[in-house]
């Protein structure tokens, strides 16, 4: 993967290991999600392929996480189009966005901050 992706995840790793404020962690998480999405976009992988497969699920979930920070990095909120209000299941990931639309974000909704690393691995394994 590109050097920018490694750099973004190195910074996020430091944030997860050291005590941080929630705002700092949100910013790092938003950067990581945005970077992952851009990596997929550069490879023309951002349009879901139907029927859903693991790659489409992975990229779409990354996009939903990226989107929740679009209006406020400090106070992220889910804004999920109805067609993407799904249960995302692939590899060891199982995240339901069925009922998250309109809710404030917290890391428990996605299995914790570490989930972004599992999404990175899932994307890398499929490219």
Image (spheres, rainbow, N blue to C red):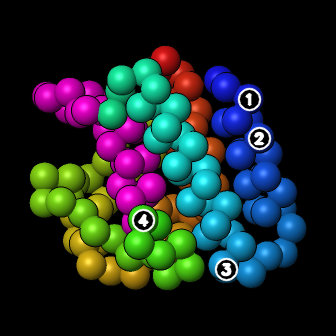
Please tell me which residue lies in front, 26 or 108: 26
| Pointer 3 or 4: first along the chain | 3
- Does 61 lie within the magenta span? yes
Q: Which residue is mark 1?
A: 3
Could you tell me how far apart the alpha carbons at marks 4 and 2 are, in whole angstroms? 21 Å
Tell me the tag on residue 7: 2
CA gap between label 2 and label 1 equals 6 Å
Where does label 3 land, which residue? 22
- In the image, which residues are magenta? 47-68
Q: Earlier in the sequence, mark 4 or mark 2?
A: 2
Q: Residues within 10 Å of mark 3 (few under 14, many from 20)?
A: few
Label 4: state its secondary structure: loop
Provide the residue designation for mark 4: 70
What's the distance in space between the residues labelled 3 and 4, CA to CA? Answer: 17 Å
Does 114 lie within the magenta span? Answer: no
The residue nearer to you, when weighing 99 against 31, is: 31
Callout 2 secondary element? helix
- Tell me what residue is drawn at x 52 percent, y 49 percent: 34
Labels 2 and 1 touching (C-beta < 8 A): yes
Looking at the picture, does residue 127 appear above or below residue 81?
above
């Amino acid at each position: 993967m590109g050097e920018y992706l490694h750099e973004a995840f190195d910074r996020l790793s430091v944030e997860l290991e050291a005590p941080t404020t929630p705002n700092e962690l949100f910013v790092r998480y938003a950067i990581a999600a945005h970077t992952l999405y851009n990596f997929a976009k550069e490879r023309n992988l951002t349009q879901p392929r139907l029927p859903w497969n693991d790659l489409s699920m992975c990229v779409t979930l990354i996009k939903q996480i990226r989107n929740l920070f679009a209006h406020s990095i400090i106070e992220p909120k889910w804004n999920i189009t109805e067609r993407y209000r799904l249960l995302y299941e692939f590899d060891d990931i199982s995240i339901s966005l069925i009922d998250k639309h309109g809710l404030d974000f917290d890391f428990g909704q996605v299995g914790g901050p570490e989930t972004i690393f599992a999404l990175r691995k899932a994307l890398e394994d499929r490219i």
